[in-house]
Image (tube, rainbow, N blue to C red):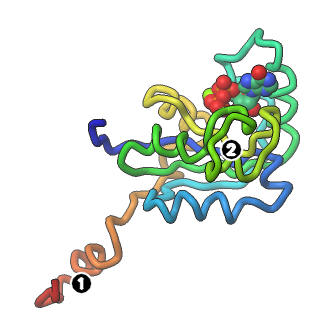
Amino acid sequence: MAERFERTFVAIKPDAVNRGLVGDIISRFEKRGFKIIGMKLLHPTLEHAQKHYAEHVGKPFYNNLINFITEGPIVAMVIEGVNVIDISRKMMGTTDPQQAAPGTIRFDYAQVKESNVVHGSDSVESAEREIAIYFKPEELFEARENDADYFIKMFGHVEEKSF
Ligand code: IDP
Ligand code: MG
């Protein structure tokens, strides 16, 4: 797979916020090395929900999905990294937790697809669209490469490296 630097929209859904899973879920993405460049706790409005799930209008589960996502706060995040769109969805597992591979977020934390704990964009286009629903450009921050690079650039006084 080509290595592409990407951004994606991730939401920790109301079921997971309510169950106190926020820290565990964020931690998985951080440990993978993905950078959080935007994050907020918010209660999605009907407008948020309808825009977010526009592709599912008319499906049998649509009304339940809208009710579910507007039920309580979500943690909305933008994360950045190499192939983050595909990899973060792999980390989440399949839509139906019953089919998800052990070790994925949906396998580990959920039982049914109606409350499957997380959302992740499925393409570059979806990511752009979904990020714009929940974030203003000024709410996104530049990811630091790593602390060493940052301090070298910032202070420019590191004379040698030991590696
Ligand atoms: P995804 O979240 O894995 O991308 P989508 O097909 O985009 O899955 O569906 C959006 C959300 O709608 C799912 O995460 C799930 O919560 C819900 N959903 C999808 N298919 C069904 C279904 O057949 N029955 C009930 N809920 C569903
Ligand atoms: Mg989807």
Image quadrant of ligand 2?
top right
> Pointer 1 and pointer 2: residues touching (CB < 8 Å)?
no
Q: Residues within 10 Å of mark 2 (few under 14, many from 20)?
A: many
Which sits in the foreground, 45 or 69? 69
> What's the distance in space between the residues labelled 1 and 2, CA to CA?
39 Å
Q: Return the mark for residue 118.
A: 2
Split into 4 quadrants, where in the image is the C terminus?
bottom left
Q: Whole-percent x and y of residue 66?
A: 81, 27
Q: Secondary structure at mark 1?
A: helix
Residue 148 to residue 92: above or below: below
Q: Is residue 56 visible?
A: yes
Seen at 81% across and 46% down, the residue is 14
Residue 147 to residue 86: above or below: below
The total of numbered circles placed on residues is 2
Asked if ligand 1 lies within 8 A of label 2, the reply is yes
Q: Whole-percent x and y of residue 47?
A: 75, 28
Name the N-terminal-most of marks 1 and 2.
Answer: 2
Q: Whole-percent x and y of residue 79?
A: 49, 51
Seen at 51% across and 63% down, the residue is 30
Q: Amino acid at mark 2?
A: Val
Residue 22 to residue 116: above or below: below
Q: Return the mark for residue 155.
A: 1
Q: Is residue 48 visible?
A: no
